[in-house]
Image (cartoon, rainbow, N blue to C red):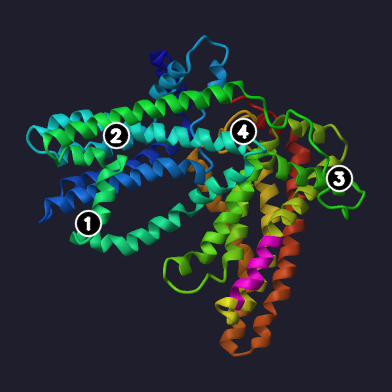
C-alpha cells in the first residue's frame, strides 16, 4: 500500500510540474535548499566548546520542527493531494492508511529539503557515530512529518466540531502566538546559548525530541542508542495517533449535517436582496469551519502584532495593529467563491444577482472585520502614541473600504477550488503556496496604493506644522475607502456577470 500511494503522489506531482506551476515549484525548492544549506553550514561549523555546537544544532532543528508544525496552519496549507476520504471504502487498517500517506508525504519539496537539512547530523557526527547518524536522519525526518500531520489532523477535527470550537480557539491561539514566543526566546536566550551560559536551555534543547538526533551523534553509546530507540517509539506512537485521527475523519458526520438552530445575527438588516446576502454571509462566517479559522487567524494576528512589542520587551503596543489586521484579513479571505464552491450556481441562475451578491459579501466582510479594526484603531494609540491618531484614523477607513473591494476582486479574478467540508479547515486546496504568496504580495501593493492619499495629506500637515491639515487625512481616508469599496466592487460584479460560468467551473473542480 505504501508503494502504491508513493507512486500516486509522484504521478500527481510529475503531471503538475508544467508551465507556471513548474517555475513556482523550482523557486520554492531553491528557497528551501538555501535554508537546508545554511543548516549544513551550522552543522559543520567548529566551536570552541563542542557542547555549544551541539546546542546550536539542536536549536536549529527545533526551528525546522516548529516550521513543520506551524507553517501549514499559518499559511492555510496542508498537503491534501491524497486525501484520506479517497480511500475510505478500501479495506485498509488505520495503520496501513497512515503508513501509506506517510510514505507519500516524502514525495515533495518540503520533505526533500528537510532531509537535506537533517543530513547535517552526518556532518556533525565523528567516528563510528556516523552509523548512528545514518539511522537518526530518517527517524528525525519521519518524526517532523508525523508531528505535522497529527497536529493538522487534530486541529481540523476539533475545529470541525461545534462543541470543540472553544478548545480549537485555544489551540489556534497557541499557534498564532508561536512566532512571537520564538522571537522573544531568540532575543533573550540566543546570546546565552552561543556563549554556553544557559545550562537549562541546553538541557531543554537536547532532551526535546527534536534534539534527540543531535544528542545521539554526540553522546556515549548507551545514550545514543536510547535516543535512537526513543525516536522510533515516538514515531510509532505518532503513527498510531494519526491512524486514529484518519479513521475519525473518514467516518464522522459533518458538523453541519444536523439541524441548526436559526440565529439572527443582525435584526436591523434591511429586507432587501443585499440584506439577505449579508445575513447569509454572516451565518456562513459563523458556521463554516474554514471561515471560522479565517476569522480567528485574522483577529489573533492583529492582536499579536499589536501587543507583540510590549511582550517582547521592545516598548509599547503598536498603534497600527488595526491597520495591519485589515491587511491580513484581506489575505485570508481572498477566495470567497472558492470557499462556496459549486454553490455559486445559485447566484448565476438568478438574473441580475451578481451585483447584489458582490455588495452583500463586501458589507458582510466589513461587519466581520470592521468592529475589531476600529476598536484597535481607537484604543491602541491612546495607550501608546496619541500623536499618531491622524495616521491611524485616516488609514483605518481607507484600508477597510479598499480591503472590502479587494476581497471580492481577488475572489472573482483569482478564485481556486477548495477541498469539501470533510477536509481539514486549514487545507488551502488548489492554490500553490508560492502562487498564493505572489497574490498576497499583489494585495499588499494595492492596499499601499489605497493608503497613499492619506499618507500624503498627513505628511504634508506634519511638514507644514499644521495639525488641522494632518487631521484632514481622516475625511480623505473615509472618501478613499468609499471610492475603492464602490469601484472595485463594481469591477468584481461586472467580472462575475461576464465570466461567472468560467469561475463556477474553476471553483467546482474536484480535489
- The residues tagged by marks 4 and 2 sit, at their Cα atoms, a distance apart of 31 Å
Q: Earlier in the sequence, mark 4 or mark 2?
A: 2
- Of residue 495 and residue 304, the one placed in the foreground of this image is 304
**Dominant secondary structure of the magenta stretch?**
helix
Residue 508, relative to residue 331: is it above or below?
above
Q: Earlier in the sequence, mark 2 or mark 1?
A: 2
Q: For the C terminus, which image quadrant? A: top right
Quarter of the figure with residue 139:
top left
Query: Farthest residue toward the top?
Result: 91
Q: Dot 4 corresponds to which residue?
A: 418
Q: Which class describes the residues within 10 Å of circle 1: few (<14), some (14-19), or many (20+)?
A: few
Q: Which class describes the residues within 10 Å of circle 3: few (<14), some (14-19), or many (20+)?
A: some
Q: Dot 1 corresponds to which residue?
A: 199
Q: Which secondary structure, mark 2?
A: helix
Q: Which secondary structure, mark 4?
A: loop
On the image, the x and y values in percent for residue 246 come to: 52, 24
Q: Dot 3 corresponds to which residue?
A: 276
Q: Earlier in the sequence, mark 3 or mark 4?
A: 3
- Of residue 276 and residue 224, the one placed in the foreground of this image is 224
Residue at x 18%, y 31% (from the top left corner): 225
- The residues tagged by marks 3 and 2 sit, at their Cα atoms, a distance apart of 53 Å
In the rendered picture of this protein, how many numbered marks are placed on residues? Answer: 4
- For residue 140, which numbered disc appears in the image? 2
Q: Which secondary structure, mark 1?
A: helix
Amino acid at each position: 500500500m505504501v508503494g502504491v500511494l508513493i507512486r500516486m503522489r509522484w504521478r500527481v506531482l510529475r503531471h503538475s510540474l508544467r508551465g507556471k506551476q513548474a517555475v513556482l515549484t523550482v523557486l520554492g525548492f531553491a528557497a528551501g535548499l538555501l535554508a537546508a544549506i545554511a543548516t549544513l553550514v551550522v552543522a559543520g561549523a567548529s566551536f570552541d566548546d563542542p557542547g555549544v555546537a551541539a546546542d546550536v544544532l539542536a536549536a536549529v532543528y527545533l526551528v525546522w520542527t516548529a516550521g513543520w508544525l506551524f507553517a501549514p496552519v499559518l499559511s492555510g496549507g496542508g498537503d491534501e493531494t491524497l486525501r484520506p476520504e479517497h480511500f475510505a471504502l478500501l479495506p485498509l487498517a488505520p495503520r496501513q492508511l497512515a503508513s501509506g500517506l506517510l510514505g507519500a508525504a516524502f514525495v515533495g519539496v518540503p520533505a526533500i529539503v528537510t532531509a537535506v537539512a537533517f543530513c547535517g547530523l552526518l556532518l556533525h557526527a565523528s567516528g563510528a557515530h556516523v552509523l548512528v547518524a545514518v539511522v537518526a536522519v530518517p527517524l528525525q525526518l519521519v518524526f517532523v512529518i508525523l508531528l505535522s500531520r497529527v497536529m493538522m489532523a487534530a486541529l481540523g477535527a476539533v475545529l470541525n466540531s461545534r462543541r470543540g470550537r472553544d478548545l480549537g480557539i485555544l489551540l489556534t491561539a497557541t499557534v498564532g502566538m508561536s512566532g512571537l514566543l520564538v522571537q522573544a526566546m531568540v532575543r533573550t536566550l540566543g546570546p546565552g546559548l552561543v556563549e554556553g551560559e544557559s545550562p537549562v536551555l541546553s538541557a531543554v534543547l537536547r532532551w526535546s525530541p527534536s534534539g534527540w538526533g543531535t544528542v545521539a551523534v554526540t553522546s556515549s553509546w548507551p545514550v545514543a542508542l536510547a535516543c535512537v530507540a526513543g525516536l522510533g517509539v515516538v514515531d510509532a506512537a505518532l503513527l498510531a495517533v494519526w491512524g486514529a485521527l484518519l479513521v475519525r475523519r473518514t467516518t464522522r458526520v459533518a458538523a453541519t449535517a444536523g439541524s441548526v438552530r436559526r440565529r439572527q445575527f443582525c435584526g436591523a438588516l434591511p429586507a432587501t436582496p443585499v440584506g439577505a446576502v449579508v445575513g447569509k454571509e454572516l451565518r456562513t462566517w459563523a458556521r463554516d469551519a474554514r471561515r471560522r479559522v479565517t476569522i480567528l487567524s485574522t483577529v489573533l494576528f492583529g492582536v499579536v502584532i499589536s501587543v507583540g512589542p510590549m511582550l517582547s520587551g521592545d516598548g509599547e503596543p503598536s498603534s497600527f495593529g488595526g491597520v495591519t489586521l485589515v491587511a491580513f484579513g484581506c489575505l485570508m479571505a481572498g477566495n470567497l467563491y472558492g470557499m462556496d464552491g459549486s454553490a455559486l450556481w445559485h447566484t448565476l441562475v438568478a438574473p441580475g444577482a451578481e451585483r447584489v451578491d458582490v455588495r452583500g459579501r463586501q458589507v458582510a466582510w466589513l461587519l466581520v472585520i470592521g468592529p475589531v479594526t476600529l476598536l484597535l484603531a481607537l484604543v491602541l494609540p491612546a495607550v501608546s502614541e496619541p500623536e499618531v491618531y491622524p495616521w491611524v484614523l485616516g488609514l483605518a477607513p481607507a484600508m477597510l473600504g479598499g480591503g472590502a473591494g479587494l476581497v471580492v476582486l481577488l475572489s472573482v479574478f483569482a478564485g481556486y477550488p477548495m477541498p469539501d467540508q470533510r477536509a481539514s479547515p486549514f487545507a488551502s486546496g488548489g492554490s500553490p503556496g508560492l502562487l498564493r504568496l505572489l497574490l498576497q504580495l499583489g494585495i499588499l501593493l494595492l492596499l499601499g496604493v489605497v493608503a497613499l492619499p492619506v499618507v500624503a495629506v498627513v505628511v504634508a500637515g506634519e511638514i507644514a506644522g499644521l495639525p488641522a491639515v494632518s487631521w484632514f487625512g481622516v475625511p480623505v481616508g473615509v472618501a478613499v475607502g468609499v471610492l475603492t469599496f464602490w469601484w472595485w466592487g463594481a469591477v468584481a460584479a461586472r467580472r462575475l456577470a461576464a465570466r461567472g460560468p468560467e469561475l463556477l467551473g474553476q471553483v467546482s473542480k474536484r480535489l
